[in-house]
Image (cartoon, rainbow, N blue to C red):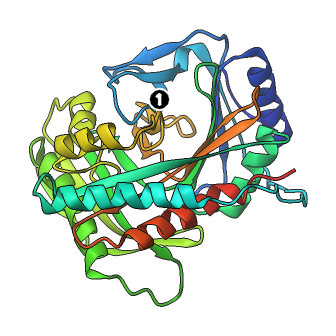
């Protein structure tokens, strides 16, 4: 595998060439880093994994055990530390959500609350997809705006001929594994960011559900599990409640077993997991595809050369079909017995702005 540090223009040119040829690639910047990294497959073959034993960059769906893979041995790794400059561009005139969109999502939330009150599950995460046409599309300006507008987030652009383009800007980690040490987080609750945040009991309860689930699952394969106190996470213009979780794994624990136990987490599915998942599949009436799946480096920190797995949940994301010039933005929220359907609808509207604001003419 070729590895090199290049100019930003060279990195973007390589991405454009891969897209034109139908060769998979991913560009990504981790939280706290100023380096934009890229893994570029050298042909258009489709590689997949369900064992997660390979080395490369993985892109996994919300449901199903098979994930797409850009393998290390079939790819080149390039990176750039150049500063990113964004040209001033006019925003796209995107359509507003309709009354039908609102009524449909509120109806879905009400069904979720009814199911919770019937004792079918304690929490369910319900989502929707906003679709619209694009007059023009260029992946590089879109990625540049995301990198500048969301400096604290995990920002990525994924392209594969079987998926089209996917973009995301969020920092919820599914897991990081180095040796026998695993790090993950519990994230839940959403409101607009402001200096003084006031979390409601519903939001604190939702976050505790996620924390308890993750700690319980890790306890099955870990010698010890340490949990931090909850604190505020800033994600663009929004805020969430976050808890850090660290585990010391038993020797020989398989990564695939950990992934299967954690994914999908209560932050994107619900509790109990199987019952919530059944409700989602039966009632959302659309295919989430890779929204609320996960993606990231598998068994290697490509920038530093370390043996490490670093996977992130695919939230605050958008898919683009560059041929049809269409886009879809995915947004959702956690529903508990105390949820307010109108507020849940507004939360999805706030989240969709994260992606809408980076699209421009």
Q: Nearer the viewer, residue 308 or 221?
A: 221
User: Quick one: quadrant of the N terminus?
Assistant: top right
Q: Nearer the viewer, residue 263 or 183?
A: 263
Q: Picture coordinates of residue 174 (x, y %)?
A: 36, 47
Report the side of 60 relative to 89 (left or right).
left
Q: Please tell me in which quadrant of the rendered image residue 2 appears.
A: top right
Q: Picture coordinates of residue 238 (x, y %)?
A: 53, 71
120 versus 13 height, above or below:
below
Q: Residue at x 48, y 49 (%)?
A: 128
Q: Residues within 10 Å of mark 1 (few under 14, many from 20)?
A: many
96 versus 291 height, above or below:
below
Q: Residue at x 83, y 59 (%)?
A: 91
Examine the rendering and report whether any part of residue 29 can be seen: no
Q: Please tell me in which quadrant of the rendered image residue 18 appears.
A: top right
Q: Which residue is mark 1?
A: 58
Q: Picture coordinates of residue 190 (x, y %)?
A: 43, 70
123 versus 272 height, above or below:
below
Report the side of 324 relative to 217 (left or right).
right
349 versus 4 height, above or below:
below
């Amino acid at each position: 595998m070729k590895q090199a540090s290049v100019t930003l223009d060279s990195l973007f040119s390589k991405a454009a060439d891969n897209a034109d040829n139908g060769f998979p690639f991913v560009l990504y910047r981790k939280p706290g880093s100023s380096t934009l990294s890229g893994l570029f497959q050298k042909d258009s073959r489709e590689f997949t994994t369900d064992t997660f034993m390979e080395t490369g960059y993985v892109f996994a769906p919300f449901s199903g055990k098979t994930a797409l893979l850009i393998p290390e041995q079939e790819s080149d790794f390039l990176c750039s530390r150049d500063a990113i400059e964004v040209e001033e561009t006019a925003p796209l005139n995107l359509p507003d959500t309709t009354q039908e969109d609102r009524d449909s999502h509120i109806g879905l939330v009400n069904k979720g609350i009814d199911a919770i009150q019937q004792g079918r599950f304690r929490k369910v995460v319900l989502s929707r997809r906003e679709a619209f046409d694009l007059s023009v599309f260029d992946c590089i300006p879109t990625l540049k705006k995301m990198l500048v507008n969301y400096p604290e987030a995990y920002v990525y652009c994924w392209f594969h001929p079987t998926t089209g383009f996917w973009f995301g800007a969020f920092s919820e980690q599914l897991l990081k594994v180095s040796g026998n040490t695993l790090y993950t987080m519990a994230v839940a609750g959403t409101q607009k960011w402001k200096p003084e945040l006031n979390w409601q009991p519903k939001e604190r309860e939702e976050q505790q559900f996620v924390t308890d689930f993750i700690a319980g699952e890790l306890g099955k394969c870990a010698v010890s599990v340490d949990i931090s106190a909850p604190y505020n996470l800033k994600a663009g213009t929004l805020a969430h409640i976050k808890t850090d979780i660290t585990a010391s794994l038993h020797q020989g624990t398989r990564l695939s077993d950990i992934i299967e136990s954690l994914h999908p987490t209560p932050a994107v599915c619900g509790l109990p997991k199987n019952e919530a998942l059944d409700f989602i599949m039966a009632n959302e009436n659309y295919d989430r595809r890779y929204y609320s799946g996960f993606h990231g480096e598998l068994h290697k920190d490509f920038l530093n050369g370390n043996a490490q797995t670093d996977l992130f949940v695919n939230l605050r994301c958008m898919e683009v079909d560059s041929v049809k010039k269409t886009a879809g933005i995915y947004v959702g929220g956690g529903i508990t017995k105390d949820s307010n359907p109108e507020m849940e609808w507004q939360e999805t509207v706030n989240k969709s702005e994260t992606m809408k604001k980076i699209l421009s003419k």
